[in-house]
Image (cartoon, helix red, strand yellow):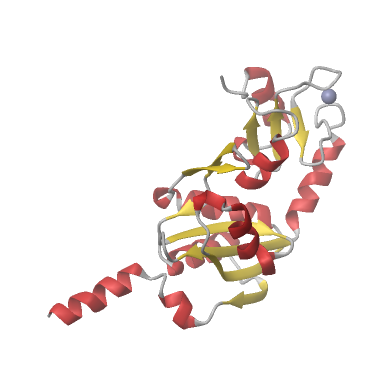
Amino acid sequence: MSGFTDEIRSFLCSQRIPDDWVCDASMVGPRRYKRKMEAEGKLFAIVREPCYNGHYIRSHKGHCMQCDTSRIAYVLRHYKEAYVYIAGSRSQRLLKIGWSETPYDRAEHLNSIGYGAISDWELLYYGSYPEAGKVELSSHSRLSWHMTPRGWFREGVPQDAREIFKCSYTEAREAIRRVAGMEGEGEWEAHWVKRKLYEPKEEKREALAVIA
Ligand SMILES: [Zn+2]
């Protein structure tokens, strides 16, 4: 059963909240939905247990978004000024684009939770954007063709990682640049030798050159 009922959809629509920003945690217990939100990088969640007014949409802090819609703006504002980052897994040849207020230790964090059942995440890029959340989500949809959803377990709870892509670093970086329409502030990039490991096309070209 999906948590996206007609009632919930019309509320989201009236508040201009795209479905993409909402985690369906209607099958998850009240103590688990926050982790699911974090894992999926969502701002809001549809929860299993309603508030005392019969609402189902919560923020990460557990506030009911329907009882007090002014809280939505607060959540969105928080979502704005942040870093967009790219992390990569060499073993799986996959990239993740996410957002964070503290991107510096993101790779360690992803490894510690085994995000996407992967434990060799390394940070490749970060930059601060005034609308980080929008940049992140738009670059996801720009790369949707490369999306490689992975099911995984966090402390025994099934999760769905939808921020993982099978594409080159250049493609991921370019997607961010295009949707942001600007360079990020305080940008950092891993050394080019490391980044080059995430350019499968280049590798292929080199391999073909060897054969020729
Ligand atoms: Zn409520």
Please indicate whether residue 186 sits to the left or right of residue 19 in the image: right
Point out the residue furthest to the front here: 156
Please indicate whether residue 151 sits to the left or right of residue 60 in the image: left
Q: Residue at x 19, y 75 (%)?
A: 208
Q: Quadrant of the C terminus?
A: bottom left
- Picture quadrant of residue 180: bottom right
Please indicate whether residue 207 sits to the left or right of residue 20 in the image: left
Dividing the image into four equal quarters, which quarter contains ligand 1?
top right
Return the x and y of residue 192 as percentages of the image width and height: 48, 82
Q: Residue at x 43, y 64 (%)?
A: 171
Return the x and y of residue 69 as percentages of the image width and height: 83, 33
* Residue 110 at least partly seen: yes
The number of numbered discs placed on residues in the rendered structure image is 0
- Picture quadrant of residue 42: top right
Relative height, residue 21 to residue 110 (above, below): above
Point out the residue furthest to the left here: 212
Q: Nearer the viewer, residue 53 or 155?
A: 155
* Residue 128 at least partly seen: no
Relative height, residue 120 to residue 71 (above, below): below
Relative height, residue 70 to residue 9 (above, below): below
Return the x and y of residue 7 as percentages of the image width and height: 68, 18
Return the x and y of residue 200 as percentages of the image width and height: 34, 68
Q: Residue at x 60, y 38 (%)?
A: 156
- Picture quadrant of residue 125: bottom right
Q: Nearer the viewer, residue 50 or 185?
A: 50
Q: Quadrant of the N terminus?
A: top right
Q: Residue at x 61, y 72 (%)?
A: 183
